Structure formats: C-alpha cells, structure tokens
Amino acid sequence: MSTYRDEDPRIHGIKTKIRVVPNFPKQGIMFQDITTLLLDPKAFKDTIDLFVERYKGKNISVVAGIEARGFIFGPPIALAIGAKFVPLRKPRKLPGEVISEEYILEYGRDCLEMHVGAVEPGERALVVDDLIATGGTLCAAMNLLERVGAEVIECACVIELPELKGRGRLNGKPLYVLVEYQ
Amino acid sequence: MFAAENGLKGDPRLQAISEAIRVVPHFPKQGIMFQDITTLLLDHKAFKDTVDIFVDRYRDMGISVVAGVEARGFMFGPSIALAIGAKFVPLRKPRKLPGEVISEAYVLEYGTDCLEMHVGAVQPGERALVIDDLVATGGTLSAAIRLLERVGAEVVECACVIGLPEVKGQRRLNGKPLYILVEPRKIDNGY
C-alpha cells in the first residue's frame, strides 16, 4: 500500500491498521476492512484529526456521510468542525420525505436518499465515506447535495483504489484521501 | 434508567435534545410513531450535548469497548469511543462484516434477525458499552449484550438516546443497566 500524501507521520499508523480481506464479498475482490482501524483508538483518532485539520475553519456547514461506514467517520468530523451531519441512506430507511438519486452498480442499480430539508441552498458540504472505488456512490451523494442547492467543497475518504479511477468521476470536484491501495 | 432521574434532572440540554428529535407518524407502518434522530444530527449543539452527556458519564468507568448497533448506533458510538479512548466495534446485520464473525439471532415482531461481530475485535475481560439510538423491546440490545458476553467481555451498560414506554421503569436489560436520555415526546402535529 502506498500513501497519497507526503508522509504525515500519522499516516503510516493508519494504513497498517486497515485489514485486507481477500475474496470478499466475492472472488477477486481485496476488501479494505476499516473495522481494524477502529480497534486502535490512537489510529482512529489520528484519522479523524487529519480530516478535521483540513476542514476546520473552512465554513463547511454540512458533513454528509454515506451509509453505513460513512456514518462512522462523518459524525466525529462534523462535531469537531461545527457542522451538521446528514446521513445518506439506502432506500426506505429514512422516515421522512426524501429525495433519491440512482446510481449504477457493476450489476444493476442502487439508490441513495437524503431527507428533504436537511440541507439548505448555499450550504458548503463535505461528503465522507470510508473508501472510493469507482466513484459511483460518491457521485450520487454529490448529486443529492447539489440538487438542493448546496455546494460540495470536497469528497473525503480514508482509502482510495486508484486503479478504479473514481477520482476522475467526481464531476471535477476534488477528492482527499489518506491512503491508496494499489 | 432515565438521565433525568440520575443526576441530570432539569438539565436544559435534555429538553433541547428531546425537542430536536422529529416524530414521524406511521413509519415504517401504520400505528408506529417513529422517533427520527436525523433532525438531532442537524442541530450541532444538541448533537454535541448528546455525545457530551454520554462521554461525561462513561469517561472514568474503565471502558475499553464501545459497541454500536448498525446503523444509527454508528452515528453516536464512534464519537463517544474517541472521547473516552475506547475502541469502536460495529455490530452489523448479516454478511456485512468481511472477516470471521460470531452471530446472535434475535426475535422480531414477525420472524428473526441476526447481529454479527468480528471475531477478535473484543478480548475477554474488556469492559464494554453498547450504544444504539433507541431501545424499544430490547431485543436488539439483548443480542448485542450476548455477543459481547460470548467473547468474555463485561457489558457495563447499554446507552440509548431514546427509550420507548416498554422500558420505562426498567433500570436493567438482561441484568445489565440501561441508561436513556429522553423518552418520546407527546406530539400533535408530528414535530
């Protein structure tokens, strides 16, 4: 695994805590398991701190996290930078009125939903997930936010899989990641 | 046990937390008044107060594990874990966790469901907190407790933001203490 940035000394500790699980959920996929990172309080704290240091003081009022692993990283970031947290969920989980954005999977489609009224026009938003692969889910997330008039400042992930070229599928929006998996 | 009866009586933060929770009638089905915490997450101060109340309670209890129940437990648990220096362990629906897991079944109104935890995430003797947004019948929390006890951890307490009337008056769940911030508000118009 190579790092994305010139080495902040915390990055090494973070990348060594991510467990790779071969052939999950199916043959050929090397699954990036962040649950082992969460078992190390220092490494987990460092992960959050790196994001908070980047986004604090940038007038970001919304952190949108993608279900479910985005719910683990997003709220601590939101709390630390003074933003609200907005969960972006699979269909039929959110109880109130929602807007939906469909996106393409390898086989078939899926859908991401956001509560109507959660985000106001003009708000500056950050999208958070544990990992970016093809970028399809992040793209759907950004579309939801832009449809209600928010400005997506950046997408933030712990891990990037550069071979899948997700970075180039974000409608020109910047991506910030802590580690790459080659 | 409710926070207001246990040292936080009259704490204005509790009222603000309660009022930030939206009630959605007839979700997911007729007759259920769904307690929607997403509106709490939109209120930075109320969300921060929620986390702070739990952190203040648990920071000196020697807790090394915060176990959060998918998915809304993930919204509260990690912040608590980070503040008290504990690890965070997600308890998930089947087939989500990639590594070797242990599973615990629990009963729903119609049928059963299952909660899973990674093998090796928690060691024998660790002191654990279980967190979810809401406790109704206690079925899910009971499954969470059993998972942790099966690997030899000691569940110190279960903590929820909201407790439904079924648990009012109960201080314990499966013999474990239960700590709840608020009960559902009586509402006329849904918010």
Image: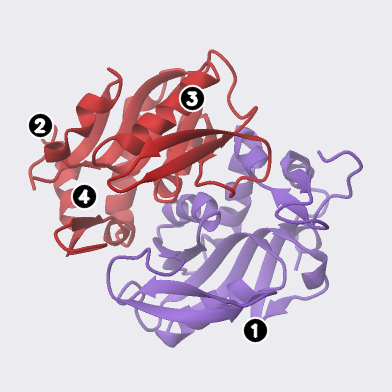
Chain colours: A red, B purple
Nearest the viewer among B107 and B85 is: B107
Q: Chain of mark 3?
A: A
Circles 4 and 3 on the same chain: yes
Q: Which residue is mark 2?
A: A6
Nearest the viewer among A60 and A123 is: A123
Q: Residue B174 has which mark?
A: 1
Circles 3 and 2 on the same chain: yes
Nearest the viewer among A179 and B49 is: A179
Q: Earlier in the sequence, mark 4 or mark 3?
A: 4
Q: Chain of mark 1?
A: B
Circles 1 and 4 in contact, beta carbons < 8 Å:
no
Circles 3 and 2 in contact, beta carbons < 8 Å:
no
Q: Position of residue A155 (x, y in %)?
A: 33, 29
Q: Chain of mark 2?
A: A
Find the distance from the CA under tag 1 to the CA under tag 4. 37 Å
Q: Position of residue A95 (x, y in %)?
A: 67, 45
Find the distance from the CA under tag 2 to the CA under tag 1. 50 Å
Query: In which quadrant will I find the C terminus of chain B?
Result: top right
Q: Is residue B60 left or right of residue B172?
A: left
Circles 1 and 3 on the same chain: no
Q: Which residue is mark 4?
A: A14
Q: Which residue is mark 3?
A: A145
Q: Residue B87 has which mark?
A: none
